[in-house]
Structures are given as C-alpha cells and as structure tokens.
Image (cartoon, helix red, strand yellow):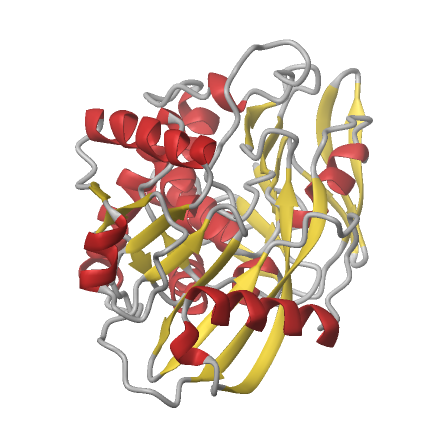
Amino acid sequence: MKNWNNTAEIIIIGGGILGTSVAHNLAKKGQKQVVLLEKEFLCEGSTGLSVGGFRQQFSTPANILLSRESVQLFKHFEDEFGVGIDMNQPGYLFLAREEQTWEDLKNGVQIQEKYSVPVERLSPEEISHRWPYIKTRDLLGGTFCPEDGYADPYLVTMAYAKEAKKQGVLILENTEVTGILVKNGRVRGVDTSAGKILAPRVINVAGPWGGKVARMVGLDLPVLPYRRQVFVITCTKDIPQPVPMVIDMDMRHYFRGESSMILTGMSDLEEPSSFNLQVDQTFMIKVVEALVQRAPVMADSKMIRGWAGLYAVTPDENPIIGEIEIIEGFYCAIGFSGHGFQHGPAVGRILSELILEGKTDFDLSPFAHDRFGKLNLPGEKRAV
C-alpha cells in the first residue's frame, strides 16, 4: 500500500478466509488503502484447522444462497487465481434416526429445491445400496447432494492473500489488535502490538476472537469459541470410493474420505466455551466408537493423527454480518458456527459491496447483530 504512514481507509482484523476474501474483494473494486492485521500468521487459526467442507444442504435460505455462490466461486477458482485448491465433490450424505430429525431433513429438502440444489431423499435401502459399509438398520432415511464436497482452506486463503497484496493491500502478520479507537460514536482506528493505525472503517472477521474484538467497541455480541476435534484414521478394508461426507445428525458425528484414509469428528455438546486446542484422548475414543457404530467395517482401523480447531458459535448458529449501526464504520462477519470457510468467498463479495457502495444485493437481515431476543427467525438446523 502506497503512502502508508500508519493510516488507511479500511482495517481488517483477522487473517483467515474471511479476512483475505474481504481484502481481495475490496481491492478488486478499487479500494487500495486497506490493511489486514493478523495476530499470528495467515490461515493459522480456525480456517487452517478446518476440514474445508462446503455444502448446499442448509435449512435456511440465506445459508443456501451463500453456499450456492461460494460453490460456483470454488469451481472457477483456479481459472481466476491460477491456483488449484484440491477441490473434491463426493457429496454430503445426511442421516436421520429420530422422527423429528427426519422431518427436519425432509423440510430442508423442500427449501433447498426452491433454490435449485440437486438434493435427493434416500430410503435406508437406497443408502445401503450406494454405500454398503454404512449401517442403516436404525435409520429412517437420508438426504444427499452430489455437488457438496471439500477443498483446501490453506490454498484458498493464501491465494486470496497473494492477489490482495498484488492489488495493493498491506498484510501485517504477528500484529495483534489490542484496542479499537472510537470517538463520538464512530471508528477512528486501532491500537496494535506494533502501534496505532488510523482508519475510518474497521472490519471484525476475527473468527473465534470476534466476540472479544466486538467488546473493544463496547458491544456484547453472543459469539463464543468452542473446540472441535478432528481425527484421521487408516481404513484397513477396501470400501467403494469416493467416500462422501457422512453426517449422522442425531449423533452430531461425521466422517469422509481423505485420500486413502478417513477423516472423522463429532460435536461435544457438553463441552463449555473455551480457546482450548488440546486433543482429548478420551473424546477421541468416543468419536471412533461413533464411527464404528455407523460404519462397522472400520472397526480395525488405526489412528494416524488428530487436531483441534475452534468454531465461533452464535445462539442460532447463524453468523453476524454487516455494519453495527451504533458504531459508525464498524463491520462484522463473525459467528459462522463452523461454516466460515465455505461461506467466505461469497461473504467477501457481499461485505465489500456493503462497505464501498453502502448496499448489497444480498438480504442480510437474517444475520443482523441485534436479532437475538427480538426477531423470530429460524436458526440453522444443519450445524454439526
């Protein structure tokens, strides 16, 4: 960025997929006076620790639309950036054991079909025929979309960052924001571990730290960090490839193929909010037990490695996106509840429009920061 002098037009807090996507889109639209601040290294937080999944099977129209746009961007990513992102589309298979879960999945399909999502309702018999390693005796049914899949979060994030730099964005790593400067109800800049930076607009895309950043301007937004653990195992038995992302909604457990191995994880709904990134061996056993319960063929598998990342979770498991009107110049895109990577490309485009043009063609009302306790909006029923 030219004429730096510790001043900018826009400061971005967070160097994951959201931060770099917003930076790229702002620069692409002509705003070059942008500084992105990351307290550690780019893609070292939640984005880099995610499993890179993307899917269109959501229960709310807003999330479906974000996914539809992002999937198209992923498909053409290499053409635009000249970088392969290891995109795979083996599909997502959602499974239901309980009556209410099955009703929710079927209701979700009705919504998804309105937005041209190529989703199928499947009986237990159809599931068993396509994926014979899945135990189906206790299932009522499932839904499947063949366009869902996964990509490499690191490759996507770094490609955005590289292009943003090329267009003039200044990216400062190892630079932690310690405070946000506000005067007369509007943003003036930030204090950092490297000194003060002045700017009239600040974007909070700090992931699990998003709630902490919001408190720097006196806002108590309900965004909390929760640990999510992931494990990679070998599969000693030959099973049909590719292995889709299989999600047992009643167990909140999932597994999918990872090259010649299996990647698996599960939500621990009893674990309190924290920034804990340690791997819990006891919980690992629970995850493997759930895997074997759903796919008995994996009983002889061996553990390769595991890691933990953080979800930034809101009460309705939908994000907060947009300008916080009570603090002029302060914007947020936080609380994606595990969906930040897959929605990052679309949100980068939407937020850059909102900031530079004062409006966007995307209805952000379901993601309003003040919706909690006020608006009777449905939460996202397909968070895992």
Depth check: 352 or 152 in front? 152
- 45 over 263 or under it: above or below: above
**Horizontal side, residue 183 vs residue 383: left or right:** right
Depth check: 23 or 34 in front? 23
Q: Position of residue 81 (x, y in %)?
A: 27, 62
Q: Residue at x 31, y 44 (%)?
A: 141
Depth check: 334 or 237 in front? 237
Q: Residue at x 45, y 21 (%)?
A: 364
Depth check: 363 or 11 in front? 363
Q: Residue at x 42, y 54 (%)?
A: 247
**Horizontal side, residue 378 vs residue 184: left or right:** left
Count of numbered tags: 0
**Horizontal side, residue 183 vs residue 242: left or right:** right
> Residue 231's quadrant in the figure?
bottom right
Q: Position of residue 205 (x, y in %)?
A: 59, 43
For the question of whether residue 230 can be seen, the reply is: no
> Residue 335's quadrant in the figure?
top right
- 198 over 240 or under it: above or below: above
Q: Position of residue 102 (x, y in %)?
A: 38, 36
For the question of whether residue 3 can be seen, the reply is: yes
Q: Going by the picture, which residue comes out furthest to the front?
A: 137
- 76 over 323 or under it: above or below: below
Q: Position of residue 142 (x, y in %)?
A: 31, 46
